Image (cartoon, grey):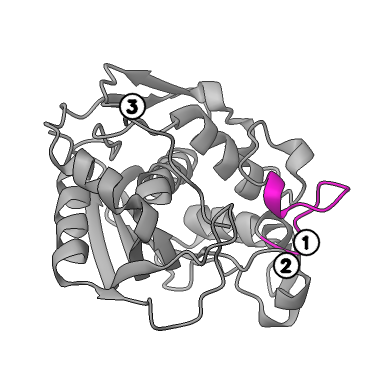
Amino acid sequence: MSYADTLFIENCKDILENGAWDTHLPVRPRWEDGTPAHTVKKFCVVDRYDLQKEFPLMTLRKTNFKAAIDEILWIWQKKSNNVNDLNSKIWDSWADETGSIGKAYGYQMGVKHIYPEGEFDQVDRILFDLKNNPGSRRILSNIYVHQDLHEMNLYPCAYSMTFSVTGDRLNAILNQRSQDMLTANNWNVVQYAALTMMFAQVSGLKPGEFVHVIADCHIYDRHVDMVKEMLNKEPFPAPKVTLDPTITDFYDFTVDSFTLEDYQYHTLGQKVPVAI
């Protein structure tokens, strides 16, 4: 089975069996009918994926691979905060009449800062250091900018990446404040594993270990039965994901730069409700 399935099963079983419910607390998210969307959660889940062994794409449920890659390029490559630059509708409910989600995600990636070596935004600073100072322990991003939170339509969930070069391998840590296991866990894992692959390739490195740190790892109340349904399925082997080896500039990658082969997956018997 895919190792992404293995970790998803372990985490969901732990949450359902040992997690804490927040039904006694007021919560921000709501279901479409206005009902509070409560969760059962575990604190600080840490998952590790070796990208040399396999790409972490789950099979217990389909992850829309191309849409996931499109969103990560929207944030890190286009540095956009406007849904009109995105090919999916996943951000539409957070956008204003112009399509903007405020000073969130891609907006923060494009803000330039002054360094001794010159002016860089966060993406270009990371790419510069990976090529010119790979031994640095300061190669990281942070889009949880407190002075801009009041102008963000949604506070960032996945808010920081830390990169570390070990030998010829690029390792990365994704820090995430909140994770909806059913709808977003593998989506985010796919995105930031792919980002690690892209950064490694254009820096003359190989992708190494991708570590996902989740502070509040939860399952929504209306997702519990669907998660239990998934846990009763037999996972398929991990698919193969490869990257166009001719690309040497991060800004030349597209969704079609990735090749996905032998992806088998299960389907859910019902539409997944989304808490907003």
**Residue type beneath disc 2:** Met
Vertical arrangement, residue 36 with respect to residue 7, above or below: below
Write down the residue under mark 3. Answer: 241
Residue 22 is situated, as x and y percent measured from the top left of the image, at 37, 77
Q: Secondary structure at mark 3?
A: strand
Discs 3, 1 touching: Cβ within 8 Å? no
* Along the viewing direction, whichever of 270 and 130 lies nearer the viewer: 270
Which one is closest to the eye, mark 2 or mark 3?
A: 2
User: Which contiguous range is marked in magenta?
Assistant: 92-104
- Amino acid type for the residue under numbered disc 1: Gly
Q: Main secondary structure of the magenta part?
A: loop
At 49% across and 39% down in the image, what residue appears? 202
* Pointer 2 residue: 152
Residue shown at 62%/30% (left/top)? 252
> In this image, 270 relative to 34: left or right?
left
Mark number for residue 102?
1
For label 3, count other residues whose C-alpha is less than 10 Å away and answer few (under 14), some (14-19) or many (20+). Answer: some
Q: Image check: 229 left or right of 223?
A: left
Asked if the stretch drawn in magenta spans residue 105, the answer is: no
Q: Which residue appears at 70% of the width and 61% of the height? A: 121
Labels 2 & 1 near each other (Cβ < 8 A): yes
